[in-house]
Image (tube, rainbow, N blue to C red):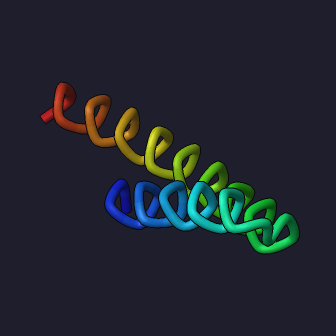
Amino acid sequence: MLRWTIIFIILALVAGVLGFGGIAAGAAEIAKILFFIFIILFILSIIRGRKV
């Protein structure tokens, strides 16, 4: 999931440089959502790993 976040960040940067503001904003928003989902799942996996 972190890989997808990085891909969308790079896509947002490239789209922003080329002047596609709408696409850049959409890709940045998707990257932000995926990043927070990744962080939540990472924290949950750490918590579950300690209980076992």
Residue at x 58%, y 44% (from the top left corner): 36
Residue at position x 85%, y 64% in the image: 21
Q: Is residue 52 above or below residue 36?
A: above
* Residue 36 against residue 12 in the figure, above or below: above
Look at the image and tell me in which quarter the C terminus lies. Answer: top left
Q: Quadrant of the N terminus?
A: bottom left
Q: How many marks?
A: 0
In the rendering, at what x and y percent does residue 8 appear?
53, 64
The answer to whether 25 appears left or right of 49 in the picture is right
Identify the residue at the far front of this view. 18
Residue 11: image quadrant is bottom right
> x, y percentage for residue 10?
48, 59
Residue at 29 percent of width and 42 percent of height: 45
Q: Residue furthest right?
A: 22
Name the residue located 66 percent from the left edge and 68 percent from the top edge: 15
- Taking the image as shown, residue 1 lies to the left or right of residue 37, namely left
Position of residue 19 measured from the top left corner of the image (x, y, whole percent): 78, 66
Q: Position of residue 41 (x, y in %)?
A: 42, 47
Q: Is residue 43 above or below residue 7?
A: above
The foreground one among 2 and 46 is: 2
In terms of depth relative to the viewer, which is nearer, 7 or 34? 7
